[in-house]
Amino acid sequence: MIGVVYISFLIIIFVLKSYVNYITIFHEKGDIMLICGAQLYNPVTMHYDNFDVRIQKNTISDLQPWEQSTPEENETILPLHGAFLYPGFIDSHCHLMGTGEKYLSPSLLGIRSEQTLKQILQNQLCLQQSIVLRGWDEEKLGFVPNRHFLDALPLEYPVVLVRKCGHIATVNTVAVQLLHLYTLDGIDGTSIKEGVVRETALVKMKKMLPQNVSLESNYIVEGAKRFLRHGVTSVHSEDWNPSRLECFFQSNPLHIPCRLFEKVSIQNIEELTYWIQHKSEIQHKIASSFIHTDRMIKIYMDGSVCGETAYLSTPYLKSHQNGVCYHSVETLRQMILLANQNNLQVCIHTIGDKALENVLKSFAANPFSFLRHRIIHAQFASRKQILDIQDKQLELSIQPCFYRADLETVTKILDPFYLQDNGYPFKSYVEHDLLFSLSTDSPVESENPFHNIAYAEEFMSRKKAFYAYTVAGARQVFQEKVLGMIAVGYTADFFVLNKDLFKMTKKELVSTIPNKVFLDGKEMIGDIHAKTI
């Protein structure tokens, strides 16, 4: 009798082990899966639903009340009782390549001493014969690392150091000579004597730098991994102008662990015309279904407020200048008209209220609201301008994290009454029910959406912020019927928490890390069976 029981026990163990192995293999494929027992958050109703979720291939095929689902043959069962499911975050404005670069090359973010900066530069020259690094901030560093500082170091190779905001850079004499930068002197306050390159001059200088497709690939993939770890399954990024995008994808069938909606950087009418003529051909070369490049363009209208180049209606206290404006109203109007004629969504970097005024004038005759044109940042705006945005049905992509990040600097460089009346009007955007999404502008700020939501609570409810980070972000890239929700017919992009996101304290919120992240129906981050990234 004991022998029979023992043999039966071995058979049961063998069957269970075989079943677990089978489940593991099938789980990796992600073809059919039933997730049971989790509470599903709906950002539209702002409530939880007690549904089991069935995934077939990459799509949510069915939702049934708890314990009413009948497992199908060969279906993976994933019990998540007590857990919470949320649609994947969608960061509506970032720089994916810059985010990856922040982690794969030395970052100057947070550097607070001259000695530390010197050591980083010397270490980097041991690895390569040119240096392009980003992240310095004169408020933290205590000085601007200009040409005189760089030339005092024993550096025989070109050095380019980009400020945290991405709108100002410093260079050494070797870089000046190698790139013939004297032709940029005076543009938007650029001083080659000081080795300080600003705004449109910096754009021109970046085009002179050689393109390293291999490095770009590494940066893009690493950036995607960093976002995905925080539950961000889609990003609207800006990484290339038309020619560099074309060069990148000519010989690079890139596969990345997130959905990339690329805003192609456009500087003038000629560049826009080139993109219109070649965008279909370039998109056709892109093998990955996760990469979309043919709908959005990005235009810069001004600079950054902490770099004192955002175009304001009042002068900065130190420089007595109003900032930098990239385009006249008429030029921008022509670019918008051409984009409208070719069904392109225009995303305009606009930080200052004076820049915003010109943008609104440019849209006066041709808003084409069905294209969902978008203002990126919108950090300064008057009440009249907010009403005009509402009237024109222009959409916004805002970064609440900037308020706290900028506060120490802007209180020193701006008139306090102007700042109070016009600065960071995110609460007014909520009150006027403007169409806006949330984003981080990473690597300028952290790619972590939980940090950004914590900052957003100064201006809106947590549930409103979550809506702006999901449904609104999907809508702005015309994906509202397939992304941003956990619903039948939607792509299975979501993350799992073991606590209710909306009952966490702020301290708990900022330290939150998803237990699992699903992308396209596959568990990318989670337990030992996940497709690790």
Image (cartoon, grey):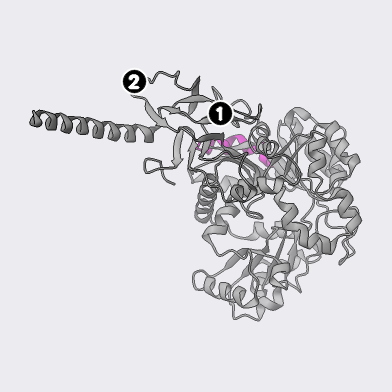
Amino acid found under the numbered disc labelled 1: Ile
* Residue carrying label 1: 486
User: Residue shown at 53%/50% (left/top)?
Assistant: 226
Tell me if 256 is positioned left or right of 470 in this view. Answer: left
The quarter of the picture where residue 246 lies is top right
Relative depth, front residue between 513 and 151: 513
The quarter of the picture where residue 356 lies is top right
Mark identifier at residue 73: 2
x and y, in percent, of residue 507 in the image: 62, 51
From the viewer's perspective, is residue 176 above or below residue 368? below
x and y, in percent, of residue 29 in the image: 38, 33
From the viewer's perspective, is residue 354 above or below residue 114? above
Report the residue that reaches farthest toward the front: 1
Tell me if 77 is positioned left or right of 44 in this view. Answer: left
Residue 308 visible in this rendered orientation of the protein = no
Sequence-wise first label, 1 or 2: 2
What is the span of residues highlighted in magenta in the rendered image? 274-288
